[in-house]
Image: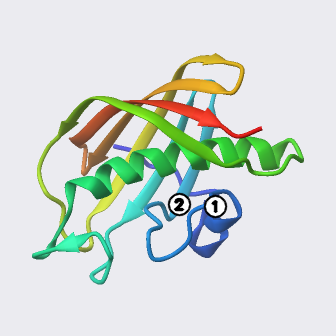
């Protein structure tokens, strides 16, 4: 079970990602260690990606993409650099599990497996209560 306290949460997250409400899919950042970073999101009752009381599958993919953006934003701000815009070039090996309801909290792990210039390949995994609910690979291009 993940027991860390967030180092950034709430509206302060907006300092590290280019996304803005109502499509923000991360609300806490737990830090980065080596090639991995950890973010969280608690599903609100009125989120734009909720349909029929559950979170749409596209929201999980967006959560993974924003978690990758949050990692880059955190590292850039830590180094005194501007937060760059990033673009998802591809989503691969996507596995989506059960639907999520309001009040459930996601923990997303991003692991960068390769970086060449402004392109990164990352593996993303989303868990809820220790249960894996989504995973994919992301090819990310950073605007320079």
Residue 103 position within the rendered picture, expressed as x and y whole percent measured from the top left: 27, 73
Q: Where 52 falls versus 104 (above or below)? A: below
Q: For mark 1, what is the residue?
A: 8
Residue at the limit of the structure toward the right, as seen here: 80
How many residues crowd mark 1 within 10 Å: few (<14), some (14–19), many (20+)? some
Label ID, residue 98: none
Q: Are marks 1 and 2 in contact (CB under 8 Å)?
A: yes
Quarter that holds the C terminus? top right
Q: Residue 56 appears in which quarter of the rendering?
A: bottom left
In this view of the protein, which residue sits in the foreground, 8 or 142?
Answer: 142
Task: Name which residue lies at 29% across and 45% down.
Answer: 127
Marks 1/2: CA–CA distance: 6 Å
Say whether disc 1 or disc 2 marks the residue closer to the N-terminus.
Answer: 1
Task: Name which residue lies at 62% across and 31% down.
Answer: 33
Q: For mark 2, what is the residue?
A: 28
Q: Is residue 29 left or right of residue 15?
A: left
Q: Where 117 falls versus 30 (above or below)? A: above
For the image, the number of numbered tags is 2
SS state under label 2: strand
Task: Name which residue lies at 49% across and 27% down.
Answer: 111
Q: Residue 17 appears in which quarter of the rendering?
A: bottom right
Residue 45 position within the rendered picture, expressed as x and y whole percent measured from the top left: 27, 81
Q: Is residue 98 left or right of residue 116?
A: left
Quarter that holds the N terminus? top left
Residue 75 position within the rendered picture, expressed as x and y whole percent measured from the top left: 73, 41
In this view of the protein, which residue sits in the foreground, 89 or 65?
Answer: 89
Residue 115 position within the rendered picture, expressed as x and y whole percent measured from the top left: 63, 18
How many residues crowd mark 2 within 10 Å: few (<14), some (14–19), many (20+)? many
SS state under label 1: strand
Task: Name which residue lies at 86% across and 41% down.
Answer: 79
Residue at the limit of the structure toward the bottom, as seen here: 46
């Amino acid at each position: 079970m993940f027991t860390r306290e967030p180092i950034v949460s709430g509206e302060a997250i907006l300092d590290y990602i280019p996304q803005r409400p109502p499509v923000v899919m991360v609300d806490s950042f737990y830090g980065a260690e080596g090639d991995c970073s950890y973010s969280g999101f608690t599903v609100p009752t009125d989120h734009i990606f909720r349909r029929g009381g559950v979170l749409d599958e596209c929201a999980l993919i967006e959560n993974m993409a924003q978690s990758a953006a949050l990692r880059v934003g955190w590292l850039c701000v830590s180094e005194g650099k501007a937060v760059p815009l990033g673009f998802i070039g591809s989503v691969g090996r996507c596995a989506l599990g059960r639907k999520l309801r309001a009040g459930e909290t996601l923990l997303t792990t991003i692991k960068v497996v390769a970086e060449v210039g402004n392109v990164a390949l990352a593996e993303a995994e989303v868990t809820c209560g220790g249960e894996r609910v989504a995973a994919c690979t992301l090819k990310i291009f950073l605007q320079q």
